[in-house]
Amino acid sequence: MSEFSPLKYENNKLIMIDQRKLPLEEIWLSYDNVEDIADSIKTMVVRGAPAIGCAAAFGFFIGVRNFIKNKNGNLNSEIKKIVRMLGETRPTAVNLFGALRDMESVVISENRDLYLENLEKTALKIWMDDVKSCKQIGKNGIEVFPEGKLNVLTHCNAGALATGGYGTALGVIRALHENNRLNMVYADDTRPRQQGAKLTVWELTKDNIPVTLVPDTAAGLIMSKKMIDLVVTGADRIAQNGDSANKIGTYNIAIIAKRHNIPFYIAAPLTTYDPETLTGEGIPIEERDGDEVRKVGDTYTTVPSVKVFNPGFDVTPAELIKCIITEKGNIFPPYKENFKKIL
Ligand code: MRU
């Protein structure tokens, strides 16, 4: 079972693998202030909804710790400033806001050392709970999948890199592999940032899990040729009715899967479920820098001045999702009612 995590917490510092550099370089960056942690989320040193939540929790703790140790002033207004700074980094992944809420709910004790100890414990718990959830998601996922040795299509990276460890969509893929039920993972390239090519392929190759890289545009062909038994992706935010935001391109795949009668699953921890957002229409979609589309690597592949629309996510309507795999069980439609039952 893979124990890899994109985060480490050592000598009072948060250390994260620089996901922008993978797979060519494995560089670990060390963080001891909240400003740099916020920047690491924004610039995608760390990415993937649950991993963003974990990094934000440590950002909160480290920010408060530095304030208490080095500065005088109003702690409550500093906490508000920290929450705003971290909350403004990436708008779609709801795990970020959930983690900040958990950190804010730690009671501010007169004994500042005790308060810091409790904050540190809470950040560690958010991280460890996520790993536990991912492993359980893996176990639950294989129970709903079709029989036999499976060919699985996934999009983006919902692996150990995107979580506290183990992964959600890649968690169920790992569980399939561990149970000798996996034939092949087809990993979408995932333009523009290529999380599939760069991260999913790196992660699976490292763990000797069979993977074939395909361009995003091949989804229709490989499904029509019966090369795919199921699709599983992660999610950044699941609305109350089951509409699910995930990396741009997920919606296209879900439509093609429907056309070919191939089951489409979302694998996500309950920290990704947002009952306060009623439907997908209410999910904020992050727009990213146009250069992500204009360039491949550092090289422009278009007219550098061209106008670009670069949404980071899209929303797959609940009706296209066969089942949402969570750590508390596999949720089927109607999602609103069935999520209510397990929460
Ligand atoms: O922009 P990213 O790389 O943060 O997007 C990541 C995804 O879309 C993942 O599929 C999602 O966060 C789930 S990760 C378990």
Image: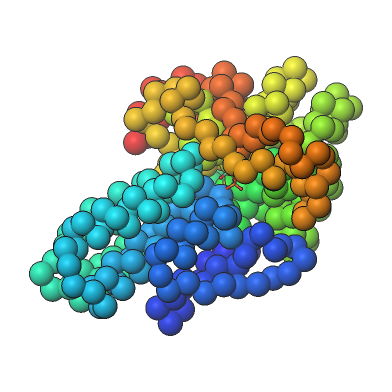
Residue 338 seen in render:
no
Residue 227 seen in render:
yes
To which quarter of the image does residue 205 belong?
Answer: bottom right
Is 235 on the left-hand or right-hand side of 253? left
What residue lies at 35% left-to-right and 69% top-to-bottom? 62
Which residue, as the protein is rendered here, is positioned at the far front?
Answer: 305
Which residue, as the protein is rendered here, is positioned at the far left?
Answer: 110
x then y, percent, for residue 89: 46, 49
Which residue, as the protein is rendered here, is positioned at the far bottom?
Answer: 11
x then y, percent, for residue 66: 31, 73
To which quarter of the image does residue 24 belong?
Answer: bottom right
With respect to residue 117, does 187 lie above or below? above
What residue lies at 56% left-to-right and 50% top-to-bottom? 48
Residue closer to the observer: 161 or 31: 31
Quadrant including the C terminus: top left
To which quarter of the image does residue 247 belong?
Answer: top right
Residue closer to the observer: 137 or 247: 247
x then y, percent, for residue 189: 77, 44
What residue lies at 59% left-to-right and 41% top-to-bottom? 288
Q: Quadrant of ligand 1?
A: top right
x then y, percent, for residue 18: 62, 65
Count every numbered label the image shows and give the total.
0
Quadrant including the N terminus: bottom right
What residue lies at 26% left-to-right and 78% top-to-bottom? 70
Residue closer to the observer: 65 or 292: 292
With respect to residue 320, does 6 lie above or below? below
Is 35 on the left-hand or right-hand side of 167? left
Residue closer to the observer: 99 or 32: 32
